[in-house]
Image (cartoon, rainbow, N blue to C red):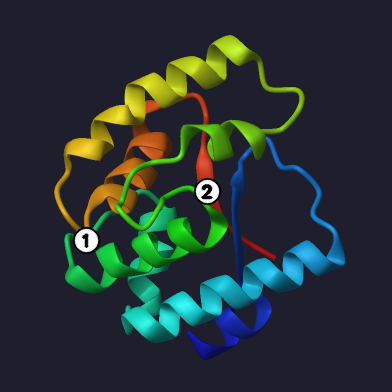
């Protein structure tokens, strides 16, 4: 497992339609994820499993996603999804209609309850939307 993480560093929250990150952006995002893994004390395997579509309902995973979403600006301090930031970080080639539909579909995550909004949003975008917000590995 340790070797896997040596090769694959959790790098960022990004859209699957992969926008290229600058070295500075990549370094900053890697730092966000590292900080969130450490602060949430999440088992890294749970993050890998979530990326694969297997979602464990654990406080640590909720805290991890909340931390990452806040650090990249997708979630404010009141746990409100920041649709304008999600739109701004969407790849230029993604149609407005597809993006609007994805955001509308996953707006229900807002009702997940305290500490669970980011987790619910990630899960929704991963499983129910054409817009895929993804934790990518680099």
**Rendered residue at 22%/54% (across/down):** 116
**Which comes sooner in the sequence, label 1 or label 2?**
1
**Rendered residue at 37%/61% (across/down):** 65
Residue 95 at what x, y percent from top left? 65, 15
Residue 83 at what x, y percent from top left? 48, 33
> Circle 2 — which element?
strand
Q: Is residue 61 visible?
A: yes
Dot 1: few (<14), some (14–19), or many (≥20) neighbours within 10 Å? few
> Circle 1 — which element?
loop
Q: Is residue 48 left or right of residue 106?
A: right
The quadrant in which the C terminus is found is bottom right
**Rendered residue at 68%/22% (across/down):** 94
Whether residues under marks 1 and 2 lie with C-beta atoms below 8 angstroms apart, the answer is: no
Residue 2 at what x, y percent from top left? 52, 89
Q: Nearer the viewer, residue 103 or 131?
A: 103
Q: Nearer the viewer, residue 50 or 97?
A: 97
Dot 2: few (<14), some (14–19), or many (≥20) neighbours within 10 Å? some
**Rendered residue at 65%/67% (across/down):** 29
Q: CA distance from mark 1 to mark 2?
A: 16 Å
- The residue pinned by badge 1 equals 56
Q: Is residue 9 visible?
A: no
Q: Quadrant of residue 63?
A: bottom left
- The residue pinned by badge 2 equals 134
Residue 45 at what x, y percent from top left? 37, 74
Q: Quadrant of residue 21?
A: bottom right
Residue 129, relative to residue 136: is it above or below? Answer: above
Q: Residue furthest bottom?
A: 2
């Amino acid at each position: 497992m340790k070797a896997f993480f040596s090769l694959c560093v959790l790098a960022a929250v990004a859209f699957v339609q992969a926008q290229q990150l600058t070295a500075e952006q990549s370094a900053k995002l890697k730092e966000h994820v590292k900080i969130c893994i450490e602060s949430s004390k999440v088992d890294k395997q749970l993050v890998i499993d979530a990326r694969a579509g297997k979602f464990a309902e654990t406080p640590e995973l909720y805290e991890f996603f909340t931390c990452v979403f806040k650090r990249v600006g997708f979630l404010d301090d009141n746990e409100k999804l920041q649709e304008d930031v999600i739109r701004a970080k969407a790849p230029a080639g993604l149609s407005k209609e597809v993006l609007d539909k994805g955001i509308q579909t996953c707006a229900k995550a807002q009702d997940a309850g305290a500490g669970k909004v980011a987790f619910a949003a990630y899960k929704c975008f991963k499983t129910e939307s054409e817009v895929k917000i993804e934790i990518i590995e680099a």
